[in-house]
Amino acid sequence: MAQTTEALEARLMGLALRAGMRGRPSPNPHVGAVIARGSRVIAVGHHRRAGEAHAEVVAIERAGRATRGATMYVTFEPCNHFGRTAPCTDAIIEAGIGRVVVGCRDPAPHVRGAIRKLRRAGIDVAVGVRKSEAESLIADFAKHITTGIPHVTLKAAVTLDGRMATRTGDSRWITGEPARTHAHRLRDRADAVLVGVGTVLADDPELTVRHVRGRDPLRAVLDSTLRIPVGSRLLRGDSPAPTLVFHAPGAPEARRRRLREAGAELVEVPGARGRLDLRAVLRELGRRDVVRLLVEGGSTVHGAFLEAGLADRAAVFVAPIIVGDAAALPLAPGGAVARLADAYALDELSVRRLGRDVLFEGALRKRS
């Protein structure tokens, strides 16, 4: 039985969505495109990296002369302005595409008019096919372009009783090798990874990508009084990624000087009672084109982001072990929650088995 038009469009948009997950286009959005004639796929493209061809152009180049009268399925409204590349709307028109099916519109205020331009050129345009999935694909870009701050994912490894470490701070290793390998994939996809100074003092992490092929993200540390040791692996390692240390105005000058000499870049932000202004931290990272921020903790940092309402997503690895100690460190200490209705829930939930461990990943929403 032949597919209905609606089912066919949903299936081909799904192919575009899968393609769009590839690449590392930050600070641009993830975009996938498919060119098809009926149910026959002619070409698939994705936006690989900022400054390179967009998904639509990649698909058009791969399709060659077969674009005439074909349909393009693209997860994101085609660009209609000159930036690092020429407008995709022009390429679509010149390729003779007959119909364009769009997943979601561009939230950027300066790019309106793409749909109108395509229609004026005689191209049939449909908008909103698998809209929610298309919007999820560009959630990080949308947050950054509309607010100036990164899309924040809290990443943690916990026991079945929700503990990130024992009362002594021991956390190596809660999860097994498959989960730790996937955690490095998350780092590779992030523009920056952030921890508190407590994690640096306890674990001396490198915060680099090691178990998979990829590139190191920018490393950021929250450290009000600059307690980070000059000999920490964040500073003496050979990673090309810079290390930013956010500190409060009253941080000792002698420590500032030693850390700068050790290679750290210091950023002063407002703070009070030993806690830094997280919004100021995020604004600074946003100015540096950090679109995806992976917050790896520790416990206090996770709690601060949740309490401030600044976390957008969570990736929690759960190991089949129980500490059984009320004094062990929880995932996120914070303000008291009297009702479960006021707790956070994971929407758009995905659950994945990684060896003996399970990864719960999704968008953070208040249940109420």
Image (cartoon, rainbow, N blue to C red):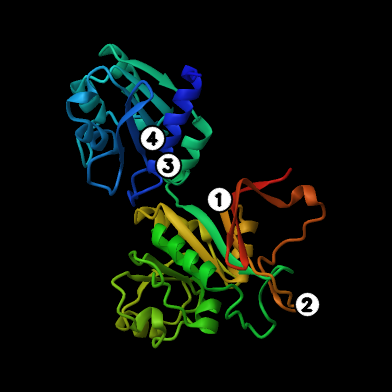
Whether 22 is drawn above or below 172: the answer is above
Q: Pointers 4 and 1 in contact (CB under 8 A)?
A: no
Q: CA distance from mark 2 to mark 1?
A: 30 Å
Measuring 51% from the left and 37% from the top, which residue is drawn there? 133
Residue linked to disc 2:
324
Measuring 82% from the left and 55% from the top, which residue is drawn there? 338
Q: Residues within 10 Å of mark 3 (few under 14, many from 20)?
A: some
Say what amino acid the circle numbered 1 marks: Asp
Q: Residues within 10 Å of mark 2 (few under 14, many from 20)?
A: few
Residue linked to disc 1:
312
Say what amino acid the circle numbered 2 marks: Gly
Say what amino acid the circle numbered 3 marks: Arg
Look at the numbered disc 3 and give the secondary structure of its residue: helix
Residue linked to disc 3:
18
Residue linked to disc 4:
108
Q: Pointers 1 and 3 in contact (CB under 8 A)?
A: no
Q: Pointers 2 and 1 in contact (CB under 8 A)?
A: no
- Counting from the top left corner in percent of width and height, residue 74 is at 37, 31
| Mark 2 or 1, nearer chain start | 1
- What is the residue that sits farthest to the right in this orientation? 338
Measuring 33% from the left and 79% from the top, which residue is drawn there? 260
Q: CA distance from mark 4 to mark 2?
A: 49 Å
Say what amino acid the circle numbered 4 marks: Ala
In screen coordinates, is 367 left or right of 135?
right
Q: CA distance from mark 2 to mark 3?
A: 41 Å
Q: CA distance from mark 1 to mark 3?
A: 22 Å
Of circles 2 and 3, the one toward us is 3
Q: CA distance from mark 4 to mark 1?
A: 19 Å
Look at the numbered disc 1 and give the secondary structure of its residue: loop
| Mark 4 or 3, nearer chain start | 3
Q: Can you tell which quarter of the image residue 164 is in?
A: bottom right
In the depicted view, which residue is nearer to us: 55 or 261? 55
